[in-house]
Image (spheres, rainbow, N blue to C red):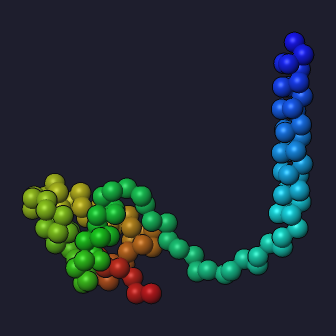
Amino acid sequence: MRSSIEDLTARLGELDAEIENLRITRQALLAIPRPEPVEQTPRPDIPNHPAHQQILAALADAGRPLRARDLCEALDLPILPKHTEGIRSKPKRLVVRGVLAEPEPGLFTQPRT
């Protein structure tokens, strides 16, 4: 019993020392002044969906505006109405969110920054 009490007492001393170190560290961190917020232009909400990421990558690789048919080719999808219509809806969503621009109907590009 005595050896257990001595071990627990030693461990309690170690924990007290750790608590004191944490208290001092917390005081030091709270004393650091907060940096002034930097004004940034609001960034459009870029969806994290893989299809949207692939479309953005295809537009970046092409370096020119693309239509839904061109995007299907860039993404190695068959040129079928169901694919082109599905692909067309995704850039339209990105246009609404301000991630892409649509200079003319059905032509998608990255906005000029």
Q: Nearer the viewer, residue 53 or 98?
A: 53
Q: 57 above or below 17?
A: below
Can you say which quadrant of the picture contains the C terminus? bottom left
Which quarter of the figure has residue 50? Answer: bottom left
Q: Is residue 35 left or right of residue 31?
A: left
- Asked if residue 70 lies left or right of residue 30, the reply is left
Relative horizontal placement of residue 35, taking residue 100 as reference (left or right): right
The residue depicted at 50 percent of the width and 71 percent of the height is 44
Q: Position of residue 37 (x, y in %)?
A: 72, 77
Q: Is residue 106 visible?
A: no
Can you give x and y, in whole percent of width and height, for residue 54 in the image?
28, 64
Above or below, 50 against 92 in this view is: above
Q: Residue, x 32% and y 70% (percent of image)?
A: 56
Which residue ends up furthest to the bottom in the rendered image? 112
Q: Using the image as rendered, state which of residue 83 and residue 56 is in the foreground.
A: 56
| Corner quadrant of residue 88 | bottom left
Q: Nearer the viewer, residue 90 or 52?
A: 52
Specify the farthest residue to the front: 3
Residue 20, compared with residue 28, is above or below; it is above
Q: Residue at x 84, y 73 (%)?
A: 33
Please say whether residue 3 is visible from this viewpoint.
Answer: yes
Quarter location, residue 52: bottom left
**Which residue lies most toward the left here?**
79
The N terminus lies in which quarter of the figure? top right
**Above or below for 83 versus 14:** below
In the picture, measured across the screen, residue 47 lies left or right of residue 23, that is: left
Task: Give the percent coordinates (x, y) of residue 23.
Answer: 88, 52
Residue 35: horizontal and vertical position, in percent? 76, 76
